[in-house]
């Protein structure tokens, strides 16, 4: 075996088995990072490391293709769903979404995170493989005022993601829903708040759950919005929400009593993000997902095979 090939095997071992970063490998071998990057490319070309899609785990390839074509999505990611296995399903979705995001992210990106159990599963599955020193992670919405478990907060998720990627984060230090519009106006004029808004304007990737009006009695939903908002949702015929922007059957953003006192990315800003990834599943969310996809409110959907079937069947 030639010395060059031995060195390639050494790099493959360090990168894929020891989970060392390109920077660490460069220091170990006393070369620059660009050289390591070229070596990794050569390793793949020579087949020293082989990648194989696990079709047993990520099934329903045809369904994903149909869903992508029907709704004009950029990408569809499906995982198998088992009845009564919510935690396992969320974990699978989180892993699949994390893998996709890590394949798309670059060192200069600004990435936004919403809140909830599905997003928490994504961040939990992120691997601290690369050092993205220039990456910025930012919440898409303020906090739930102490009523929701902290591990599901947008601030928590943005901070945890930045730590895994060894990047930076800019957090929102006020609740998502404020007592009145005047308080929101005053707080959002601060220098810190304006820095967050500026990051929203430069955001490349947005990750969020998809809310459903059918789940307005679910514990996390009530912790965030409260019981009194349920009746208003019914009166306005709200179908779902993205980052607390509520929409109807026609995909139109609906003005609610929360609209002028919610601290979150503006809908117009969110719409301009190049890659908007929605993570959601379940029969109660099918209609909310369908409307979001039909009206290009999302670019990528991460869901389950069962939910995808329901979307195609119009159930």
Image (cartoon, grey):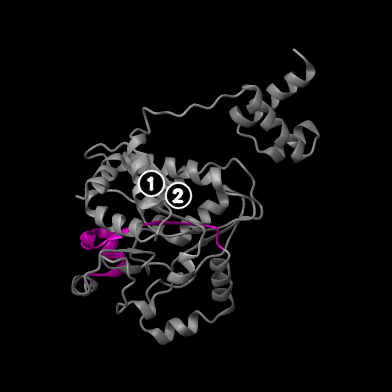
- Label 1, on which residue? 68
Q: Within the magenta stretch, is there residue 85?
A: no
Q: Nearer the viewer, residue 47 or 70?
A: 70
Extreme residue toward the bottom, this view: 182
Counting labels gives: 2
- Label 2, on which residue? 74
Circle 2 packing at 10 Å, graded few (<14), some (14-19), many (20+), is some
Going 39% across and 28% down the picture, which residue do you hit? 55
Circle 1 packing at 10 Å, graded few (<14), some (14-19), many (20+), is some
Q: Where's residue 66, x and y in %?
A: 34, 42
The kind of secondary structure element at disc 2 is loop
Q: Quadrant of residue 201?
A: bottom right
Q: Where's residue 238, x and y in %?
A: 25, 68
Going 29% across and 64% down the picture, which residue do you hit? 223
The kind of secondary structure element at disc 1 is helix
Instruction: Identify the mark at residue 301; answer none if there is no mark.
Output: none
Instruction: Say which label, 1 or 2, has the lower sequence index.
Output: 1
Q: Is residue 252 left or right of residue 271?
A: left
Q: Where's residue 193, x and y in %?
A: 54, 75
Q: Quadrant of residue 11?
A: top right
* Quarter that holds the N terminus: top right
Q: Where's residue 175, x and y in %?
A: 41, 72
Q: Quadrant of residue 61?
A: top left
Write down the region rendered in magenta. 203-227
Whether tag 1 and tag 2 are in contact, CB under 8 A, the answer is: yes
Q: Is residue 88 left or right of residue 195?
A: left
Going 34% across and 45% down the picture, which residue do you hit? 67
């Amino acid at each position: 075996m030639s010395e060059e090939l031995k060195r390639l095997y050494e790099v493959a071992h360090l990168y894929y088995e020891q989970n060392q970063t390109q920077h660490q490998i460069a220091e170990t071998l006393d070369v620059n990072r660009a050289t390591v990057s070229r070596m990794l490319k050569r390793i793949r070309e020579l087949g020293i490391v082989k990648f194989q899609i696990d079709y047993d785990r990520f099934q329903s390839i045809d369904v994903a293709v149909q869903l992508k074509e029907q709704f004009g999505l950029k990408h569809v990611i499906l995982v198998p769903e088992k009845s009564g296995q919510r935690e396992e399903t969320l974990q699978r979705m989180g892993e699949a979404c994390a893998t996709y995001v890590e394949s798309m992210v670059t060192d200069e990106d600004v990435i936004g995170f919403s809140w909830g159990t599905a997003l928490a599963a994504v961040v939990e599955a992120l691997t601290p493989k690369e050092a993205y020193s220039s990456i910025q992670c930012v919440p898409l919405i303020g906090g739930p005022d102490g009523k929701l478990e902290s591990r599901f907060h947008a601030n928590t998720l943005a901070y945890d993601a930045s730590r895994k990627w060894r990047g930076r984060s800019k957090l929102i230090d006020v609740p998502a829903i404020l007592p009145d519009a005047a308080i929101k106006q005053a707080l959002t004029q601060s220098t810190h708040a304006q820095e967050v808004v500026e990051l929203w304007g430069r955001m490349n990737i947005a990750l969020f759950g998809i809310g459903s009006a059918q789940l307005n009695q679910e514990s996390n939903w009530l912790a965030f919005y409260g019981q009194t908002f349920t009746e208003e949702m019914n009166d306005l015929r709200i179908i779902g929400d993205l980052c607390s922007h509520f929409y109807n059957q026609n995909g139109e953003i609906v003005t609610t009593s929360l609209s002028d006192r919610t601290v979150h990315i503006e809908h117009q800003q969110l719409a301009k993000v190049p890659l908007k990834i929605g993570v959601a599943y379940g029969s109660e969310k099918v209609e909310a997902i369908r409307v979001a996809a039909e009206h290009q409110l999302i670019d990528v959907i991460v869901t389950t095979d069962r939910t995808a079937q329901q979307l195609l069947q119009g159930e």
